[in-house]
Image (cartoon, rainbow, N blue to C red):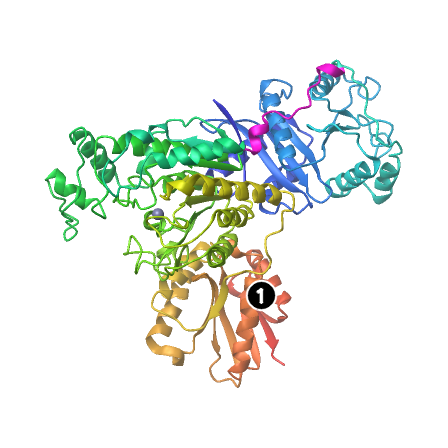
Amino acid sequence: MLRIRRIYDDILPVNKETLRQVKEILKSQFPDVSEDEIESLGEKLRNPFKQRFCAIPLVAETMRGRVLGFATLLHEPQIGFAYLDWIATASGKTGGGLGGALYDRVRREAASLRATGLFFECLPDNPHECPEPSVLKANRARLRFYERYGARPIINTAYETPVNPGDTCMPYLVFDGLDRPRPLRRAYAKKVVRAVLERKYADLCPPEYVERVVASFKDDPVALRGFQYVKPEAAKSAVESQSFEQIALLVNERHTIHHIHEGGYVESPVRVRNILTELEKGGLCAQVKPRHFAEKYIYAVHAADFVNYLRRACAEVEEGKSLYPYIFPIRNKTRPPKEPSVLSGYYCIDTFTPINRNAYPAARGAVDAALTAAREILDGRRIAYALVRPPGHHAERRAFGGFCYFNNNAIAAQYLSAYGKVAVLDIDYHHGNGQQDIFYRRSDVLTVSIHGHPSFAYPYFSGFEEERGEGEGEGFNMNIPLPEGVNGKQYRKALAKAIQRIEAFSPQFLVVAFGLDPAKGDPTGTWSLGTQDFEENGLLIGALGLPTVVIQEGGYRTRTLGRNAFSFFKGLATANSQWVNNRRRAKAVLVGMNFRTEVDQKDSERIRRLVEITGFFSAAEVDLAVELVSERLEKGPECGYHFLMAEHYGRIIGYTCYGPIPCTAGSFDIYWIAVHPDFHRRGIGRGLVKETERLIRAAGGSRIYVDTSQRSQYASTRAFYEGCGYRLETVLTDFYAPGDGKAIYCKPLV
Ligand SMILES: [Zn+2]
């Protein structure tokens, strides 16, 4: 089976491998293209605005990750056009089924960006311009293929003018009006051509050439060549599958088998029915059938013994009967009890989530729906909604409870995390303890939850503000507990804080654990959000502009469930599609960053992680960096080592270590500076140096020294110090090793 997906970065192993294959195809299909151009693909992903285009690479691959073809689309949001930079297949054919699938996808992507047109170059199909018969044949096939979509070369302009005298086979500029074939206006076409020539061919086209080509656009509307290969009426310009921008809706059809007929068990099938009825009215969603996924995706976030217990226990319990935990053997985790009914308490956090015959298959169905939703996102859908029950966000790595068995949103987040960073935003009234527990020690999945304070709201034991993650995950869990009475406006304030945190994390994907229990009158909540508030929440979250998987959690006031859900999705879809039109650059000023100077016990470990991850220092140097922290912790400031930490939401992202040079009057040394690679080129290093200088000045310092190696590896370090106003004072030749001198820089503080 084939799928086409967008690549978001060149960092993850899966994408690295994909890009490697893409480069292979490029090299074999376009032998004339320079190595630099091919290598720049990764750079374009990291820095999409470098050419003032946003690069969107799409790959067609088998389910096992073999790349069969790819296309790169450049989007220009200001002028509003898309440019097809590359389209290539491993076999060399772009006109066949695969090329067609890729081109369909390119058109869909361009249309969803609201581009007015799609432009690209095609080599000429005229024997005067292209004398080589085999090339001519291929060019004809290509132009015939595009004509089927109504796309044809622009004529009566000087676009094909050779840049250098004697250049032959100059490409045509082809225009595809997408699904809104309107006349191509001259003023717009001029802007497009200028942008393409100036940005894409800056090295090739001198300014006079650009001016001449732009000035040659005289017709208004700009003329396109007549149809040469297909009858005009046979061309189909409609963009395939308008449902592209609809929300993919995945319903766990097996949810109805899970029905606990007991007083107070508010988690019932009617919830899904109400939401579905309301969503079906609006045409906002397109239903997609959930696929079955292997159990390995569940094992990826839940402990195997826990999963196996649930499966077995549900199968063994008598039909129609429910088994409720009543003993909680929490005192000895290493000795699970033998008796099945007692074992339920070993794996459960409360007394109201039963084991029964249907719980397991229903929960399994919910997992399939959640994973299919994630899959839809990987296939390029902007929003997918898994309308499931039982819910999942209270299920931890080794525990069920709170009506939840498997953590659907964590399973989806884990699945997506193989392709890019994921933020999980839990907007259920109750704390998302499940995903917090599962991702607590990870920095590639950010978990944020807004909920009723655990002092009065379920699950009571977690959801406190100070739970911020551990180890590598420190700073990657954020809890925003709120008081008992909260209205829509107060809620939005908390939501804005959560969104700010997510923006600072800059994930590739968003998973929303979607609870409707913040609504007014919910039997399990205390807040008073109205239908309009849900739309506002959707607008705020949609403005993040991320590919988003929404997974149903709680919400029990059946009268308003459907209406509130519809409002939320209306807001979410509206803001998400608006975002693609006015995409902003990543914020230069880093939100959530602060400095601190005191050193605490955990810092040894934090500094070790930071220094190691830079990949810049040897094992001995790493040990030395950690030793300085230990010495400071043991002896206090008297030891002469001072620290300045740059923290981002509680995680150290950079630091300096400095101190007075003994036996001098006011000379200081900066011994150490390191910045986490995720935060390079964001001004953290400069900020640290500036703040360190301020501290040194305040301590009576007048001169600062730094030293570094002369090796080429340290060229950027030397450039950095020079940029901060440090002057090279002297070089101690062969200091570190023969040929490796020590460069000493100095900055007098005036
Ligand atoms: Zn809830």
Picture coordinates of residue 398, whole percent (x, y): 25, 44
Q: Position of residue 46 (x, y in %)?
A: 58, 46
Q: Is residue 308 above or below residue 704?
A: above
Residue 147 position in % (x across, y down): 72, 20
Residue 360, can we see it?
yes
Residue 297 lies, with reference to residue 621, above or below; the image says: above
In this rendering, the count of numbered labels is 1
Relative to 173, is 21 on the left or the right?
Answer: left
Please state which of residues 656 and 119 is positioned toward the viewer in this rendering: 119
Q: Classify residue 730 by image quadrant.
A: bottom right
Could you say where residue 431 lies in the image, as x and y percent from the top left?
A: 35, 52
- Left or right of 324, for residue 537: right
Left or right of 608 on screen, residue 158: right
Instruction: Indicate whether residue 719 is drawn in magenta.
Output: no
User: Which image quadrant for residue 610?
Assistant: bottom left
Locate the C terminus by quadrant.
Answer: bottom right
The crowd level at tag 1 (other Cα within 10 Å; few <14, some 14-19, many 20+) is: some
Q: Is residue 239 magenta?
A: yes
Judge: label 1 CB < 8 Å from ligand 1.
no
Q: Which residues are magenta?
A: 232-246
- Which structural element holds mark 1? helix
Q: Residue furthest left?
A: 339
From the image, tell me which residue sits under label 1.
686
Q: Nearer the viewer, residue 122 or 430?
A: 430
> Residue 265 versus residue 74: which sits nearer the camera?
265
**Identity, as a three-letter code, of the amino acid under mark 1:** Arg
